[in-house]
Amino acid sequence: MPPKAKVTPEMIIDAAVEVVRRSGFESVNARTVSSALRCSTQPVMYHFSTIENLKRAAYRRADSLHTQYLMNARPGEDPILGIGLNYVRFAVEEPQLFRFLFQSGYAQENSLMEMLDSGELAPVLEAVKEGAALTKEEARKVFVTVALFAHGYASIVANNHLEFDEKLISEQLERAWTGALLTARQEENDENDGQK
């Protein structure tokens, strides 16, 4: 008889993310995760002493998936606006993961400014900075405006209160982006003028 396949922590985390995708983060427990793995609950509880620890590990994995998704702009799409659109698209395509990331209370950051300083957002902020030839501070200001705007749309869409209209959202994100960019550059010019 062949030896039983070993259930690893990575396999358990992947299964927990799949449970979230299908049924929401509230459904993650030893039984649902072990069922997804087709094993007993023993390996789940062996590797994760509490379901809370497993949910936190699944949250980190979902956060990483979200960041990867944001960074994949579609061909021909402005990379900066693509990040905003991808944020909303993620909510459309992965509503349960979106709710887990942004409406479950599992985020370690307590404010938007703390989120800006998190390691997960570093590649996104760098893309904004490089894509628009901005300073780090300008990129942060522009990102906050666009992120708040995109988050509003994404939350409404993920909670089934608004139909996804990509053309409309794209136009509105472009307005938010343009306004935030002009404002950030004007503030920088005003600051430079004040130092002369």
Image: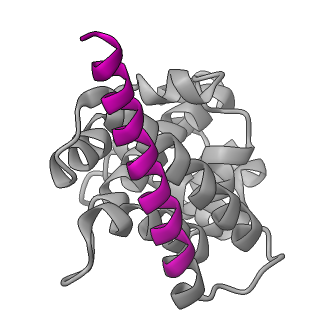
Which quarter shows the N terminus? bottom left
Tell me what residue is drawn at x 38 percent, y 54 percent. 65
In the visual, does 178 lie left or right of 104? Answer: left
Indicate whether 142 appears above or below 5.
Answer: above
Counting labels gives 0
Extreme residue in the right direction: 161
* Residue 20 seen from this side: no
- Nearer to us in this view, 73 or 172: 172
- Residue 61: x %, y % from top left: 42, 44
Where on the picture, by quarter, is residue 111? top right
- Nearer to us in this view, 153 or 68: 153
Tell me what residue is drawn at x 78 percent, y 49 percent. 26
Indicate whether 144 appears above or below 94.
Answer: above
* Residue 189 seen from this side: yes
The colour scheme of the drawn protein is one colour
- Residue 32: x %, y % from top left: 68, 56
Extreme residue in the top direction: 195
Tell me what residue is drawn at x 49 percent, y 56 percent. 179
Which quarter shows the C terminus? top left
Magenta segment, prevailing SS (helix, strand or loop): helix
Indicate whether 42 appears above or below 85.
Answer: above
* Residue 192 sits inside the magenta stretch: yes
Which residues make up the magenta segment? Answer: 171-196
- Residue 119: x %, y % from top left: 33, 27
- Residue 167: x %, y % from top left: 52, 89
Where on the picture, by quarter, is residue 85? bottom left
